[in-house]
Amino acid sequence: MTKTLNDVDIGRVASLAEKISQEPHVADTTWRAEVKWNGGFRSAAKIRDFDPANSDEPDQLGGTNTGPNPVEQVLGALGNCLAVGYAANATAAGITIHDMTIEVEGALDLHTFLGLKDGNAGFGDIKVSVNIDSDASAEALEALHEKVTGTSPVGHTLSRAVPVDIKLT
């Protein structure tokens, strides 16, 4: 019988952690996406065996608004990663989450992207608001929050300089 909390299979998570502690090389993983341009500002990312995730720019940026744009996807990736972290770590700590909403927003100046000035084309900052409905104490939720923010792969990726090697082939 599978034991779950927060719809997380506790045994599978514990099994993975045990395997990695016994065989550390198992933790070294590589993730991939293949993006196909579909004309205009439309593209689609093919990831594993899932249907392609569409991307487009909103009308006001010259797109046809058929999907979220790349910067919105980055914000969504951060929120999704944090949701996984809260669910996994709450489950490990025995904390029941009744409901959770994560709001993510980023400030972006389009001047550099449009070639109007030099500077940072990316987010100037990103703000996240996490709302968790739980019977856990404020102290337990704060400890959960510290654990999640300290271990989020997407959070860590966004908060530090990561070498990016883009080659034209």
Image (tube, grey):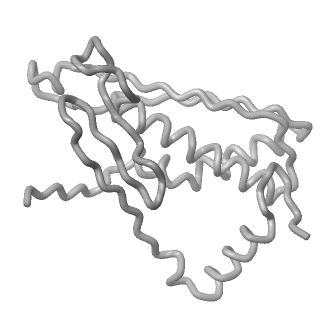
Q: Position of residue 68 (x, y in %)?
A: 40, 29
Which residue sits furthest top? 60
**At which x and y percent is residue 141?**
79, 41
Please indicate whether residue 27 sits to the left or right of residue 93 in the image. left
Location of the C terminus by quadrant is bottom left
Could you tell me residue 83's position as x and y percent?
Answer: 64, 43
Circle count: 0
Front residue (pair 133, 117): 133
Q: Is residue 96 above or below residue 118?
A: below
Quadrant in the rendering for residue 19: bottom right
Residue at left offset 18%, top offset 27%: 113
* Residue depicted at x 70% and y 47%: 86
In which quadrant is the N terminus drawn? bottom right
Looking at the image, which is closer to me, 126 or 52? Answer: 52
Q: Is residue 151 above or below residue 143?
A: below
Q: Is residue 45 above or below residue 134?
A: below
Quadrant housing residue 20: bottom right
Vertical position of residue 9 compared to residue 68: above or below: below
The residue shown at (41%, 51%) is 157
Q: Residue furthest bottom?
A: 22
Expressed as whole percent of the image width and height from the top left, the position of residue 43 reads 28, 39
Look at 29% across and 14% down and name the residue there: 59
Q: Camera-side residue: 30 or 160?
A: 30
